[in-house]
Image: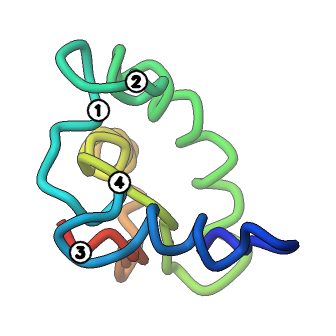
Amino acid sequence: MMRFRGPAAGSASTVSYTPGLGYYSGAAHKFGPSGDFVTAPELAPIFAQTLATPAQQILAQTAPHIIEVGAGSGKLAADLLLELERRGTLPDSYDILDLSGE
């Protein structure tokens, strides 16, 4: 969750997260070529495939759970899980923490 400080803290939180009105909780399309911005996972699966190597190493040494914060369209989750499955290293769970409500 974004933390805002200073005089504009209340306003920034309001314009970001007010249900149905805030940028991150409104219905506007945000991700991808037709949205407001494009993130690496939206461009190609290579980002998730690259991330799979350290994820695989960490999963082997700790509890096999992944938590993604602010998953947006879910493209990273889908691509990463496909790559980890291909490598035979699926986590027990993949949780997404997203405040947008979309």
Q: Residue at x 69, y 47 (%)?
A: 54
Most distant residue in the left direction: 27
> In whole angstroms, how far apart are the C-alphas of marks 3 and 2?
19 Å
Asked if labels 4 and 3 touch by Cβ distance under 8 angstroms, the answer is no
Mark 4 residue element: loop
Check the image and report above or below for 39 versus 94.
above
Asked if labels 1 and 2 touch by Cβ distance under 8 angstroms, the answer is yes
Pick whichever of labels 2 and 4 is earlier in the sequence.
4
Residue 23, position as x, y percentages in the image: 35, 54
Q: Nearer the viewer, residue 99 or 23?
A: 23
Mark 2 residue element: loop
Closer mark to the observer between disc 2 and disc 4: 4
Pick whichever of labels 1 and 3 is earlier in the sequence.
1
Q: Residue at x 50, y 26 (%)?
A: 47
Q: Residue at x 34, y 16 (%)?
A: 44
Q: Amino acid at mark 2?
A: Phe
Closer mark to the observer between disc 3 and disc 4: 4
> In whole angstroms, how far apart are the C-alphas of marks 3 and 4?
11 Å
Quadrant location of the C terminus?
bottom left
> In whole angstroms, how far apart are the C-alphas of marks 1 and 4?
12 Å
Label 3 crowding class (10 Å Cα cut-off): few <14, some 14-19, many 20+? few
Q: Amino acid at mark 4?
A: Tyr
Pick whichever of labels 2 and 1 is earlier in the sequence.
1
Label 2 crowding class (10 Å Cα cut-off): few <14, some 14-19, many 20+? few
- According to the image, label 3 marks what residue? 101
Task: Give the image quarter of residue 45.
Answer: top left
Q: Amino acid at mark 3?
A: Gly
Q: Amino acid at mark 1?
A: Phe
- According to the image, label 2 marks what residue? 37
Most distant residue in the right direction: 6
- According to the image, label 4 marks what residue? 23
